[in-house]
Image (cartoon, grey):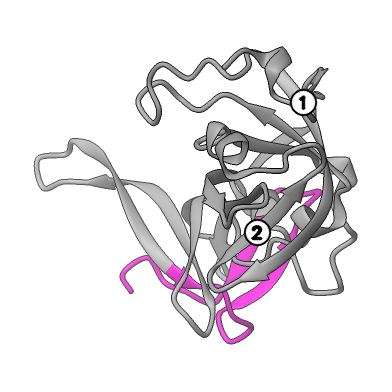
Amino acid sequence: MATESLPGLKPAVLPDDAIEVGRVLDAWGVKGWVKVLPHSAEPEALFAAKDWLLQAPEAKFRPGFSVFSGTVSITLDECKVHSNTVVAKIAGIDDRNLAEALRGARIFLPRSSFPSASKDEYYWVDLIGLDVVNREGVSLGAVRDLMTTGPHSVLCVEYQAVAEDGTEAPAERMIPFVAAYVDGVDIPGKRITVDWQPDY
């Protein structure tokens, strides 16, 4: 299916502050809705945006994708939560076949378009890469990822572990992202201070 045969897609430029926030999983229903897998447990940015930017899926995820190339913009008619995913109706996409054509497409939004986070709330993307230190100033590594365990999120902190023979290798420690262990988050200073020890 050529780009020009799929309505609702407009050529666009990916902004410098664009962040991948989700992926089109599949069509949903028969009226042109798509099911989306958000990359965050709290996908407020997806709901706040009227337009999304799409890029083709990685070849390993969906080889032979030829619906469009580069970056395209879509306008949303509606977006809502459904079970553990998000479903969206794209303007101009009115049947299941057209929606299925977008399966695997990666969804981007400019970071500048994210709604402001409340006090003591943070977007996961802003925490990735921050240094983690404990109250004694000991470096515990850097945030590589976050995951949801149900009641709360967990920081996945990567550090260099030293083996008995003196060689170093990447290792990971998990720190619950809750007030009991997290003393403070300094986004400008790129640091998270925690009540945690290296041998926990």
- Look at the numbered disc 1 and give the secondary structure of its residue: loop
Q: Is residue 75 magenta?
A: no
Asked if residue 113 lies left or right of residue 46, the reply is right
Q: Residue furthest left?
A: 165
Q: Which residue is mark 2?
A: 87
Q: Is residue 178 magenta?
A: yes
User: From the image, which quarter does the N terminus lie in?
Assistant: top right
Relative image position of residue 136 (x, y in whole percent)? 55, 68
Tell me the residue at 76%/27% (across/down). 7
- Name which residue type carries label 1: Leu
Q: Earlier in the sequence, mark 1 or mark 2?
A: 1
Q: Which residue is mark 1?
A: 9
Relative image position of residue 149 (x, y in whole percent)? 44, 76
Other-residue count near label 1 (Cα within 10 Å), few / some / many at <14 / 14–19 / ≥20 = many
- Look at the numbered disc 2 and give the secondary structure of its residue: strand
- Name which residue type carries label 2: Val
Relative image position of residue 74 (x, y in whole percent)? 79, 34
Q: Is residue 187 above or below residue 20?
A: below
Tell me the residue at 38%/31% (across/down). 61
Other-residue count near label 2 (Cα within 10 Å), few / some / many at <14 / 14–19 / ≥20 = many
Q: Nearer the viewer, residue 130 or 119?
A: 119
Which stretch is magenta?
Answer: 175-200
Q: Quadrant of residue 62?
A: top left
Q: Is residue 23 above or below residue 83?
A: above
Q: Nearer the viewer, residue 195 or 36?
A: 36
Q: Is residue 83 above or below residue 171?
A: below
